[in-house]
Amino acid sequence: MSEISFRNVEETDMEEVSSLLNQLKKIDLNKIDYKEAWSNFISNTGSNSIVGVYNKKIVAYGSIVVENKIRGEVAGHIEDIVVDTGVRGKMLGVKLVKELVEIGKNLGCYRITLFCEKKLIKFYERNGFKVNNVIMKKYLN
Amino acid sequence: MSEISFRNVEETDMEEVSSLLNQLKKIDLNKIDYKEAWSNFISNTGSNSIVGVYNKKIVAYGSIVVENKIRGEVAGHIEDIVVDTGVRGKMLGVKLVKELVEIGKNLGCYRITLFCEKKLIKFYERNGFKVNNVIMKKYLN
């Protein structure tokens, strides 16, 4: 049986990762200026993003944004978790989250937050997360 | 009647802001290495933090963390909103959030998220936020 392996995302992964993220939120991939998007993306010094490779294909992606707070605390925010629908049920998502939590630990986070739909609560509980408060969202025009 | 004014946080505000944040989450202020905390804090290139000044005193603090996503989208996360208990009821919190939303707009955010306790939902709804999904949290040791 193949094993999933994780590594930092690279510029050459962009198209593959972008279409994988379309399983999470569909956008028009033709409208992406990959060069500009990559340059802005890597300017996020506090953001760490990884891909999961399984059978030589990128099947998973996720980020952890690390924030240094004014009083010295370090907080982590997990973002954009996606696992290819073709490889679900192999616990790859659990491994992906575990990997991001490790990155957060190594960067000194005292806590990690993420937001998810209600149907995913059980999945994240398996990773040691607990429901906490309410997330509110505002779309800007 | 005095008006609140907002400006970027500066290093000399650190002690005042730190004790204001103790109204939100109490930590031992004597344990903060302000020099080191400030240097890590300003390394957050995507983080914008402001103070609200009212009657020459810092009475409000809040941050917006701006994240450039791999496909070029820009997301904002509002963090650490606090208004001095001594000046509540003057709509200063609403003005603070409005100010952070404006910063997010100017930086190109397509959406802004924040998490809050259930009792604060009404307050944020007044600012145009809607409840969305669930926030989960994991504390690291």
Image: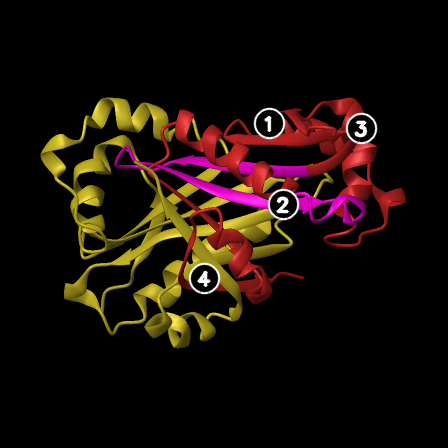
Chain colours: A yellow, B red
- Look at the picture and state if B27 lies above or below B74: below
Q: Amino acid at mark 3?
A: Asn
User: Which comes sooner in the sequence, label 1 or label 3?
Assistant: 1
Q: Residue at x 59, y 48 (%)?
A: A75
Q: Residue at x 23, y 38 (%)?
A: A13
Q: Is residue B73 left or right of residue B5?
A: left
Q: Is residue A18 left or right of residue A104?
A: left
Q: Residue at x 12, y 39 (%)?
A: A28
> Badge 1 is on which residue?
B43
Q: Is residue B121 left or right of residue A95?
A: right
> Badge 2 is on which residue?
B81
Magenta residues? B61-90
Look at discs 1 and 2 and give the one toward the viewer: 2
Say whether marks 4 and 3 touch (CB < 8 Å): no
Magenta-colored segment: predominant secondary structure = strand
> Badge 4 is on which residue?
A98
Nearest the viewer among A65 and A139 is A139
User: Which comes sooner in the sequence, label 1 or label 2?
Assistant: 1
Say whether marks 1 and 3 touch (CB < 8 Å): no
How far is mark 1 from mark 2, CA to CA? Answer: 20 Å
| Mark number displayed over residue B55 | 3
Q: Amino acid at mark 2?
A: Ile
- Mark 3: which secondary structure? loop
Q: Outermost residue toward the front?
A: B1
Residue B59 colored magenta? no
The answer to whether any part of residue B98 appears in the image is yes
Task: Name the spot of residue A119 as percent of width and height, x first.
Answer: 33, 74
Q: Amino acid at mark 4?
A: Lys
- Mark 4: which secondary structure? helix
